[in-house]
Image (cartoon, grey):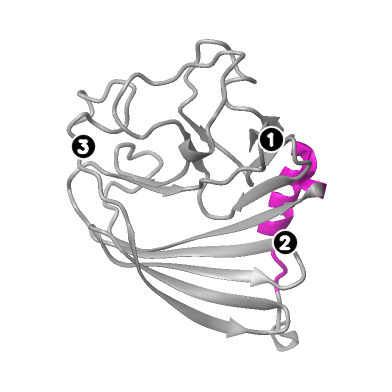
Amino acid sequence: ARRALGRNRNAAAARWAQSRLVRAVSGSAGQHVQSVVLDYAMEGCELLQVRLNAWQRHPRVDVEVIMHKLGTWDSENVYLALPFAAGPGAELYLDRGLPVRPGRDQLPGTLCDYYGVQDGVAWCGGDDGYGLAIAQADSHLIQTGPLAYGVRPFATPDTRIAPADVYAWLMTNYWETNFSPELGGFYSFRYSVLWGPTLDRPQPALRACRDANTRLRAIHLGQL
């Protein structure tokens, strides 16, 4: 299966399954956070649920993707679409220890298809004067290009990533060194989506990702 891929991670004959929303249920409604639960159906999953917690007085939505993945010996990948942007002219920045624009801030001619990131990604520098950041607490591989089999993109100074071509690469069983070869079981992936004029530059936007991932820990005094 791998020999037929080349630089691709999805074969020409790959079979695709997309999720379908089947139910939305209101959750808790407190003074600071309101929640909603979205149930999805997708081939290969017994359970697929997205829980959204919207902050009342802060431009932020916390997201948790919960799935019960069925196991299979077939080669497969699982992606989560991140189709966000921050207005015309905004560019995608990845947290790789410092802000990096895919394709533009790397050696020309190198592959700009997928990247490892630290705390998240951000769209900054748009004409509307605000930015958008996506903090990734549990997944750190980003796909930045079409998923279908084809000629993979290579970096040039003019490379631009379309919002529709940004995905969190949640799981794969192609690489045994970094992922489990058997993907069955329960999984949870957490994200935070933040936006506003203070995130218009990549440094504060990616710092907000780090702060969102560094959650406060409550310890009962009796445990000390």
Q: Label 3, on which residue?
A: 14
Q: Secondary structure at mark 2?
A: loop
Q: Indicate yes or no whether the magenta region holds residue 213.
A: yes
Residue mark closest to the camera, 2 vs 3: 2
Residue 7 appears at what percent x and percent y? Answer: 34, 22
Q: Is residue 114 left or right of residue 105?
A: left
Q: CA distance from mark 1 to mark 2?
A: 25 Å
Identify the residue at horizontal 26%, vertical 44% (top origin): 76
Mark 3 surroundings within 10 Å by alpha-carbon count, few (fewer than 14), some (14 through 19), many (20 or more): few
- In this rendering, the answer to whether 48 lies above or below 93 is below
Type of the residue with mark 3: Ala
Secondary structure predominantly adopted by residues drawn in magenta: helix
Residue 97: mark in rendering? 1
Q: Are marks 2 and 3 in contact (CB under 8 Å)?
A: no
Q: Which residues are magenta?
A: 198-217
Type of the residue with mark 1: Gly
Q: Secondary structure at mark 3?
A: loop
Q: Label 2, on which residue?
A: 59
Identify the residue at horizontal 23%, vertical 31% (top origin): 11
Q: Which comes before the other along the chain, label 1 or label 2?
A: 2
Q: CA distance from mark 3 to mark 1?
A: 34 Å
Q: Which comes before the other along the chain, label 3 or label 1?
A: 3
